[in-house]
């Protein structure tokens, strides 16, 4: 894998330079443009780890902020009140990542913020390399591959330079696992997937596919889990917040921020009524109906041939149903009350587990449809979202209408960098061609 990464970095060096230049411009602009609450909170817990160790899992945001000093009590390092001041819910590897990052750049303040974004930008660019390895020549020749790569570039830039979130690290470990699987290193792939799972748990959806490839490699997945999760569980640490999130408990959040959640049809929170009151809003079921209709129209591409399925062993049948399993995974986003917009790309990397281009295109279309329905769900339940979650989301943009000015500056800066980058490499390539022509004529170059 390391050889493949080194070769691909050399092959993509021209484009990686452009990506890094855009990212470096985006970091300071985004830091002024948006309150990156998740990054700030992870910084706080990373600093607190060196004082309290894993006991931070038993502390809520207010307790950690009070214990760590005045700088963390500005309201930008803790989650909003409607989240119930929950305890730290990210898995262990994510906490350790931010703890190491704060150790390397100690002290709170703006430069530590940008240091965090910079580290995540490097990870994001490594993700681009890993994706290029998995796509191979398709990234240059196949339309869906180029579209997916471009989509991930925008998503990854927002998550790293613009959000300081853990997703780039989770994706990096997941993509490494997929590269190792493609090389036949199944044990290492499972171990790496375990680390990804311990960063953010959504990568667990790849486990059944890797298990079907090499069942005995599952031991290595549990081995990586035992390194951190099991000792912490024995020590009495818990993941109560994470569990309440998965159980759709109102103790995690009084708001429902997922416009795809069917529960809004009979339990939309009433922001005007008494606390805890709800009302019925049946149009909230429209996104679910539309996505199910789309799946029914397209699912035949993921179903095995009847004759082959009947002749296969039960293990072979599981393998034949693998594409169908992958195709249905994005529908998980309908199951939870708390789904933010960027969650839509959580399952994007699973596209590399589909060998058929037609299936990959259909999967990409499904993710796009779910994303459009997410926005549509906000519109059809506008009375609730405009008076509930959306005002809180807008509070993360402290510049108000000047936000558009910052975005304009970013757009102009990126355009200028692109022109400079293109001029430099066009000039370099022209000189290389000229040199080659001179050498082909047998002339001496001094």
Image: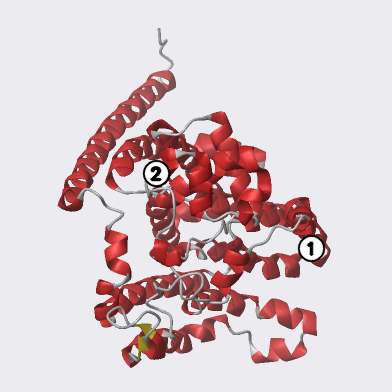
Residue 96 spot, x, y in % from top left: 63, 44
Tell me the quarter of the image containing the N terminus: top right
Q: Is residue 196 left or right of residue 162?
A: right
The spot of residue 425 in percent (x, y) is 34, 30
The residues tagged by marks 2 and 1 sit, at their Cα atoms, a distance apart of: 35 Å
Residue at 35% in and 92% down: 280
* Residue 42 in sight in this render: no
Crowding near the residue tagged with mark 1, few <14, some 14–19, many ≥20 C-alpha atoms within 10 Å: many
Q: Residue at x 67, y 56 (%)?
A: 193
- For marks 2 and 1, the one nearer the N-term is 2
Q: Position of residue 314 (x, y in %)?
A: 79, 84
Disc 2 versus disc 1: nearer the observer: 2
Tell me if residue 124 can be seen.
yes
Identity of the residue drawn at 62% across and 68% down:
205
Image quadrant assignment for residue 284: bottom left
Name which quarter of the figure residue 91 lies in.
Answer: bottom right
Name the residue beneath numbered marker 1: 218
Element under disc 1: helix
The quarter of the image holding the C terminus is top left
Which sits in the foreground, 337 or 295?
Answer: 337
Count the marks: how many?
Answer: 2
- How packed is label 2: few (under 14 Cα within 10 Å), some, or many (20 or more)? many
Nearest the eye: 47 or 22: 47
SS under mark 2? loop
- The residue that label 2 is drawn on is 161
* Residue 88 point in image, percent of width and height: 56, 56
Residue 267 higher or lower than 432, as above or below: below
């Amino acid at each position: 894998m390391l050889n493949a990464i080194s070769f691909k970095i050399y092959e993509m060096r021209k484009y990686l330079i452009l990506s890094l230049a855009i990212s470096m411009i985006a970091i300071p602009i985004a830091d002024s443009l948006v309150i990156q609450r998740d990054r700030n909170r992870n910084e706080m817990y990373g600093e607190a780890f060196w004082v309290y160790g894993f006991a931070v899992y038993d502390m809520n945001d207010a307790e950690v902020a009070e214990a760590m000093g005045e700088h963390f009590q500005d309201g930008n390092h803790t989650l909003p009140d409607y989240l119930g001041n929950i305890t730290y819910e990210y898995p262990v590897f994510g906490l350790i990542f931010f703890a190491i990052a704060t150790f390397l750049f100690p002290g709170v303040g703006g430069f530590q913020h940008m240091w965090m974004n910079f580290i995540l930008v490097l990870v994001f660019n490594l993700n681009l390399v890993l994706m290029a390895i998995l796509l191979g020549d398709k990234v240059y020749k196949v339309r869906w591959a180029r579209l997916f790569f471009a989509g991930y570039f925008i998503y990854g830039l927002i998550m790293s330079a613009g959000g300081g979130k853990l997703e780039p690290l989770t994706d990096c470990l997941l993509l490494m696992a997929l590269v190792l699987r493609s090389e036949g290193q199944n044990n290492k792939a499972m171990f790496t997937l375990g680390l990804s799972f311990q960063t953010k748990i959504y990568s667990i959806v790849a486990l059944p596919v890797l298990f079907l490839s090499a069942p005995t490699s599952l031991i290595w997945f549990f081995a990586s889990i035992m390194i951190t999760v099991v000792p912490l569980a024995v020590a009495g640490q818990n993941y109560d917040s994470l569990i309440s999130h998965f159980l759709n408990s109102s103790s995690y959040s009084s708001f429902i921020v997922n416009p795809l959640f069917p529960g809004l049809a009979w339990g939309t929170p009433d922001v005007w009524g008494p606390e805890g009151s709800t009302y019925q809003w049946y149009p909230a079921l429209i996104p679910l109906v539309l996505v199910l209709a789309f799946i029914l129209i397209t699912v035949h591409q993921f179903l095995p041939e009847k004759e082959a399925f009947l002749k296969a062993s039960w293990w072979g049948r599981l393998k034949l149903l693998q594409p169908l399993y992958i195709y249905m995974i994005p529908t998980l986003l309908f199951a939870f009350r708390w789904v933010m917009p960027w969650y839509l790309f959580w399952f994007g990397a699973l596209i590399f587990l589909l060998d058929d281009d037609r299936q990959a295109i259909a999967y990409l279309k499904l993710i796009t449809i779910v994303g459009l329905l997410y926005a549509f769900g906000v519109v059809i339940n506008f009375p609730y979202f405009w008076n509930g979650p959306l005002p809180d989301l807008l509070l993360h943009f402290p510049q108000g209408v000047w936000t558009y000015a910052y975005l304009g500056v970013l757009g102009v800066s990126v355009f200028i960098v692109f022109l400079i980058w293109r001029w430099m490499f066009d000039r370099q390539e022209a000189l290389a061609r000229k040199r080659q022509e001179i050498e082909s004529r047998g002339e001496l170059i001094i």
